[in-house]
Amino acid sequence: MIETLFREGKAFSIFPYRVIYMHASLHTDKYPVQAGFSVSSRKFPHAVDRNRIKRLGREAYRLQKQPFHTALRDSGLQLAVFFIYTDKKIADFDTLSRKFSVILEKLVKEAGKKE
């Protein structure tokens, strides 16, 4: 699934994230999205820093995913999404939270477009 996502998925960037997504046929109707998070080990050589960034991103996503899931369920869509952190510094949680609200709004708009 992940190889297909990177090969055939669509992408956009909203700093500090690059978002890759594609329509997917998931095995469950309970969750309309499969999400993954990644941080470059080249930019952050220490695992503790990479893990912190991923943890902050997952928490920002978790707190804002409910309206996103509702919008996707209402339109009958299922997505596979991958968030790649591109900044060279660790952003604070408030910044990531604001960015995730913009990212999720854009994902709903982009996913709703006809292919």
Image (cartoon, helix red, strand yellow):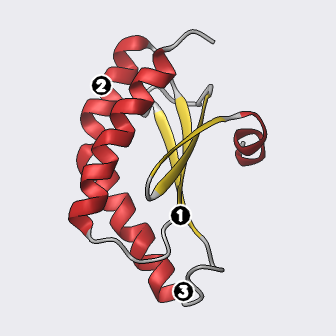
Residue that mark 2 sits on: 70
Amino acid beneath label 3: Ala
Q: CA distance from mark 1 to mark 3?
A: 16 Å
The answer to which image quadrant residue 108 occupies is top left
Give yes or no for contact between labels 1 and 3 (Cβ–Cβ under 8 Å).
no
Rendered residue at 33%/51% (across/down): 61
Crowd around label 1: few <14 · some 14–19 · many ≥20 (10 Å)? some
Q: Residue furthest top?
A: 114
Residue that mark 3 sits on: 47
Amino acid beneath label 2: Thr
Q: In the rendered structure, which disc, 3 or 2, sits on the residue that comes first in sequence?
A: 3
As helix, strand or loop, the secondary structure at mark 3 comes to: helix
Residue 115 image position (x, y, % from top left): 63, 12
Rendered residue at 41%/22% (across/down): 109
Crowd around label 2: few <14 · some 14–19 · many ≥20 (10 Å)? few
Residue that mark 1 sits on: 86
Q: In the rendered structure, which disc, 1 or 3, sits on the residue that comes first in sequence?
A: 3
Numbered badge on residue 112: none
